[in-house]
Image: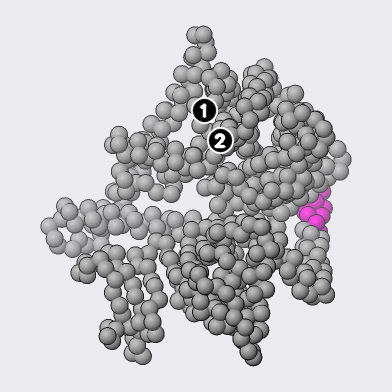
Amino acid sequence: MALLYGLLWRLLLLLVHVNRTVVCWLRVRARSFQGRLWERAVAALLLPVALIGFPGQQKKLNRNPDGTVYPVPGARAAAAGRRSRWVCDGRSVEKLPVHIGLLVAEEEPDYTDIANLVVWCMAVGISYVSVYDDNGIFQKNNCRLLEEIVRQQQDLLGTEGSKYNVEFLRNGSETHQHHGRGETRICKIYDSPCLPEAEAMFAINADGVGDAKD
Amino acid sequence: MSWIREGELNFFQKLTASVLKEGPIPKHVAFIMDGNRRFAQKNNLEREEGHMQGFNKLAETLRWCKHLNIQEVTVYAFSIENFKRTKDEVEGLMELARQKFVRLLEEMDKLESHGVCIRVLGDLNMLPLDLQQLIAESVVRTRNHNKCFLNVCFAYTSRHEIANAIREMAWGVEKGLIRPSDVSEALLSECLYTNNSPNPDLLIRTSGEVRLSDFLLWQTSHSCVVFQSVLWPEYSFWNFCQAIIEYQLNHSSIQRARELHQERQALAQLEAERACVAQQMQHHGNGKPADTQRQQEALQQYIVCREERVQDFLEALKHKRDSFFKDLCSQVSHA
């Protein structure tokens, strides 16, 4: 009897798996069929849904007070058009979250996907984004994530994207890293045996980290 | 209506239960019983009637858990935030609680025969005194039952619980029972109201709301969380089975995450202990680096001492909590 129940159990789980895969596949087909309409509906519905947030990395996005859209010629028009659509999507939602938490449950998270999510949040007007994954991958490779975000900013938002500054706030570490200009970086020293608590500028050169040229 | 619903499952329910029991079954399930008021509105009933139906559903759910060999159930009966509702509604809920606990005391032999241990978690000082006394009596009289456990969260929020646990640890340091370096995640878990229970394996929230509402936030960090749109008084055995299947589908990945977390915690604990010992040796040593064997011995010694300290502290905490209930009970017998 136990053997029969065991087999029935495996069959039950298999049926549930199959059911979910079919439903997922149908959703994807419906999405591609209805195109933009579906995307906008899903985006408008999903934006206010509170995603589970965990303490981890936080990025503070400073919005430029002058956030108007200028008409630009050529290929940049596509990026501008996208951004203005996202701003409209954001405005069409009654309430926007101030802080979104992204809990990434994948074994090997994709930097581009997360960077896209962050850029969309930026475009729609969400100021704080926390990113967390169970293995601490993003925390260890935060430079790579930041590069990816900047790249996606360029691709998706064009010149409008440079209006938004991404500021990196890392919990549990001893330095806050701010972007400087060009190759220079500014870091705030909190705890050091020999340096006073102040801001220091250093440069990332071809041969490694060194003093900044004045 | 009674806390214990007797009765067997029907044929199909029994069959499904037998099939589900072939897979992993959660040992501890937590419920956020949401949707009583909406149910009342939907069926043109009074709100009190909605809550009454909600309680009946709880009794039924406990019966299903017994048939599925789920030993421990925690329910979110009343949040500290709920005190903000209208005075009438709060008074109505307190009155319902009084009736239910009086009924529970009347059914003590049934509880004993089923081995049900009732625990009430939360800041009981916020409740009216007579209700506190009823609760204390129920808890004390079912303390030694050990077949199944029902934890009722009353005047509870998770953040309040965590803040309370930190206060207890601060009390321990103040009394000299533990050192500040003994404070850890594991010790905090032991100071929560739920320290006698394992963490929930499955958290179910009904009525379609997708939020945690400050319930067991610390304890459910590695639990399967299932949100179901059915209203609590309409919860059926099949809804419950759906949640269990969800748990079974995610069981292995959650287990992996849990084990990884435990490994990391153990490593972090060992590192902290090594650092403490190194500091100790620096202070008491004569500047010469100690050999590995002496370091190991010192580490072992430190661990043994720390564990003893922590045990003594937890005993003192248990004694403090038991006295709280005993004092309430003795107030009743003297009155």
Task: Return the x and y of residue B158 as percentages of the image width and height.
Answer: 53, 42
Q: Relative to the observer, which residue lies in front, B121 or A179?
A: A179
Which of the image's four quarters has the N terminus of chain B? top right
Q: Badge 1: few (under 14), some or many (20 or more) residues near its Cα, within 10 Å?
A: few
Task: Return the x and y of residue B264 as percentages of the image width and height.
Answer: 45, 59
- Please tell me which residue is depicted at 71% across the width and 44% down the height of the picture: B206
- Please tell me which residue is depicted at 22% across the width and 67% down the height of the picture: A196
Q: Relative to the observer, which residue lies in front, B48 or B228?
A: B48
Q: Is residue A152 visible?
A: no
| Kind of residue at disc 2 | Ile
Q: Quarter of the image holding residue B164? A: top left
Asked if the residue under mark 2 is in contact with the one under mark 1, i.e. CB atoms within 8 Å, the reply is: yes
Whole-number angstrom distance, CA of label 1 to CA of label 2: 9 Å
Q: Secondary structure at mark 2?
A: helix
**Label 1 belongs to which residue?**
B126
Magenta stretch, main secondary structure, is: helix
Q: Secondary structure at mark 1?
A: helix
A39 on left or right of B224: right
- Please tell me which residue is depicted at 73% across the width and 65% down the height of the picture: A42
Q: What segment carries the magenta color? A: A1-12
